[in-house]
Image (spheres, rainbow, N blue to C red):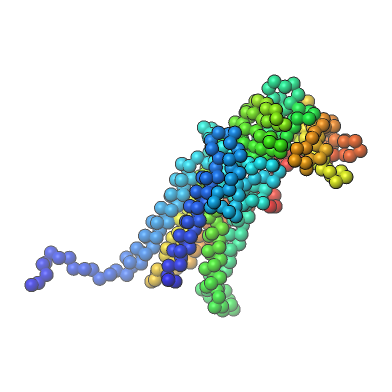
Amino acid sequence: MRRNTPLMTLLTGAVLGIALLIASMLATPAKTPTSYNAAATPTPASTAVAVQSSPAVASPVAASPASTATASATALFRADYAGRVQGDAHASVAISIHGTQAIAYACNGSVVEAWLRGTAVGGRLVMTGKNGAVLTANYDSRRAYGNVSADGITYAFSVYMVKKPSGLYRATADVRGATIKAGWIVLPDGTQVGSLESNADAAAPSATAAPPLDVAAGTAQDGSTVLHVTAISGVTGSGF
Amino acid sequence: MTAQPTTPVPLPPDRAALGAAKIVVPSLIGALVALTLGIYGRLHHPTGIAVNIAGFTSPGYVKSWLATVATVFAVVQVVSALVMYGKVPHVAAPSWIGGLHRWSGRIAFILAVPVAIHCLYALGFQNYSTRVLLHSLFGCAFFGAFTVKMLILPKRGLPGWVLPVVGALVFTLLVALWFTSAYWFFSTFGIHR
């Protein structure tokens, strides 16, 4: 009996590995990118584990396994994209990819806006945010293109890589018990598109136009409150 | 009735050959394990997602912490092995040292398995940077080497250096795995949950 314990250790590890592999296969959503809710069902073999979801988002984050892009070349990747969406003069989107993690912000400069988190794997972005926000896109070393839905409005976009000071900025502050969260997308021409959630902890935060961002100083003045702004950058890893 | 002259006389068991077979066969099985993992990791299209433990910022943090704890247990392995072999001056091996060695090893291995499954299923065997290529190779080699260690452990009559050498190899590979993954991850993204 004693002689076989190392073999038992090996077999236990193998069984655990196979069980996790099967659980992973069951937890992986179907190939359609819109099936992002499918990952919410925990598998029987993983009662103590759940599909990883970022605490910053309301829905589980799931990456689509479907991709014809070169997975090995782009599985780890650092990039920042920003630009206007199609068919709207103001709405813009900024996406930062740091390794397999991604942060995005979509905003029309007033009431429509969403922060999203998700994964970037194999040239495919799948991201979710509060209030049903979802972003699916393809990306490469030049641009990111796909769709983003925020506050019930779906935009198509094709945005290009940008370098700081263009890109995404975020500020959070606690004022009288409420969390203020502001986001700005600075476009390559210097235009700022930003919104401010006055109660960001709400399930469906309402937004207004953000105050102007002083990119050089890293601050913005919201009434009597000075917001200290963080640059979100996949290239530097800032904000991840 | 005498034996026919053509009947081969059974050779007396060659001790050295038997000892070698006791190492070679487990080594071949270990190599097969390493190859299987590598080929699966290379052929399976990485999904970017696998089952995971909730409550962490990202799967990278789950894996980095699991790997770190496994590496700490691996250090316990080396220390307890040194004590067992009487290599630590002025420290007599206590009766529980064998149990400590076995259980720290089992825990380290069991902690490493989910990390490896996430790597294989969600990320795959990759070669887009030196770190990632080394990590992929070390990962496959580690589970191969661990298999060898477990298979030769119950064998009697092996040369005394075999277990320490294989054990050291397993430990070295795990530490190399940790440096090319968790150490890199923590130093790149910061140490938190």
Q: Residue at x 39, y 60 (%)?
A: B26
Residue occupying image coordinates x 78% and y 25%: A191
Q: Nearer the viewer, residue A13 or B163?
A: A13
* Image side of residue B94 versus residue B24, left or right: right
- Would you place residue B94 above or below residue B167 in this image? below
Displayed quadrant of residue A141: top right
Q: Is residue A215 visible?
A: no
Question: Residue A153's image quarter?
Answer: top right
Foreground pick, A62 / B93: A62
Q: Name the residue rendered at 64%, 45% in the picture.
A: A53
Q: Inspect this view and state whether residue A67 appears.
A: yes
Q: Is residue A87 above or below residue A12?
A: above
Q: Which quadrant: the N terminus of chain B?
A: bottom left
Residue A121, picture quadrant: top right
Residue drawn at x 75%, y 30% is A112
Number of marks in the rendered image: 0
Residue B170 in picture, x, y percent from top left: 50, 60
* Above or below, A139 relative to A47: above
Percent of width and height locating residue B66: 60, 56
Task: Give percent across and percent down for residue A102.
Answer: 66, 38
Using residue B11 as the reference point, say whether residue B109 is left or right of it.
right
Near-viewer residue (B156 or A55): A55
In the rendered image, residue A90, in percent from the top left (x then y), is placed at 76, 24
Question: Residue A117 or B11: which is nearer the viewer?
Answer: A117
Q: Which residue reaches farthest left?
A: B1
